[in-house]
Image (cartoon, rainbow, N blue to C red):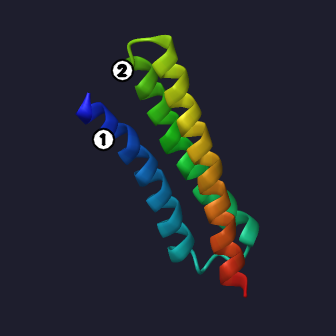
Amino acid sequence: MIMETLLFFSIIAIALMSSIVFIRKSRKITSNTLRFFVPTLLSLLILSAGVIWWFIVASDGFSQVNGAMIYIASFFIIIMINGILLLKKGK
């Protein structure tokens, strides 16, 4: 139970850190749209793998739905963080 919870939240942390690192390292890309969509797609892929893993691991439907909703909410939070970082870089 503790290991599942640790893995559950570490997937969210990995998705967040990978998108932040990509935005910081992609200074050569001049298009802000491309700099926004590539880390967003990367975090979407990581969190989608997390949702699939959680549906396999969770034992009841309530846990499966709650886990998927947490991953979806974290995806939108990561999108907002990406946007804030790009707007901050533009100034």
34 relative to 3, above or below: below
Measuring from the top left, give residue 39's x and y in whole percent. Answer: 58, 58
Measuring from the top left, give residue 4's x and y in whole percent. Answer: 30, 32
Q: Quadrant of residue 9?
A: top left
Tell me: 34 left or right of 22: right
Measuring from the top left, give residue 56's x and y in whole percent. Answer: 40, 18
The mark nearer the N terminus, 2 or 1, is 1
Image quarter (top left, top right, bottom left or bottom right) of the N terminus: top left
Q: Secondary structure at mark 2?
A: helix
Per the model, the C-alpha gap separating discs 2 and 1 is 13 Å
Q: Amino acid at mark 1?
A: Leu
Q: Amino acid at mark 2?
A: Val
Between 34 and 49, the one nearer to me in the picture: 49
Tell me: 89 left or right of 52: right
10 relative to 68, above or below: below
Tell me: 12 left or right of 91: left
In the displayed orientation, state which residue is furthest to the bottom: 91
User: Nearer the viewer's eye, disc 2 or disc 1?
Assistant: 1
Residue drawn at (47%, 68%), measured in percent from left and top?
21
How many marks the image carries: the answer is: 2
Residue drawn at (63%, 64%), measured in percent from left and top?
82
Q: Please tell me how crowded label 1 is: few (under 14), some (14-19), or many (20+) other residues with Cα within 10 Å.
A: few
Q: Secondary structure at mark 1?
A: helix
Q: Check residue 6 in the rendering and tell me which mark sits there, or answer none.
A: 1
Whether label 2 touches label 1, CB < 8 Å? no
Between 85 and 2, the one nearer to me in the picture: 2
Residue drawn at (56%, 70%), measured in percent from left and top?
23
44 relative to 35, above or below: above
Q: Please tell me how crowded label 2 is: few (under 14), some (14-19), or many (20+) other residues with Cα within 10 Å.
A: few
What residue is disc 2 on? 57
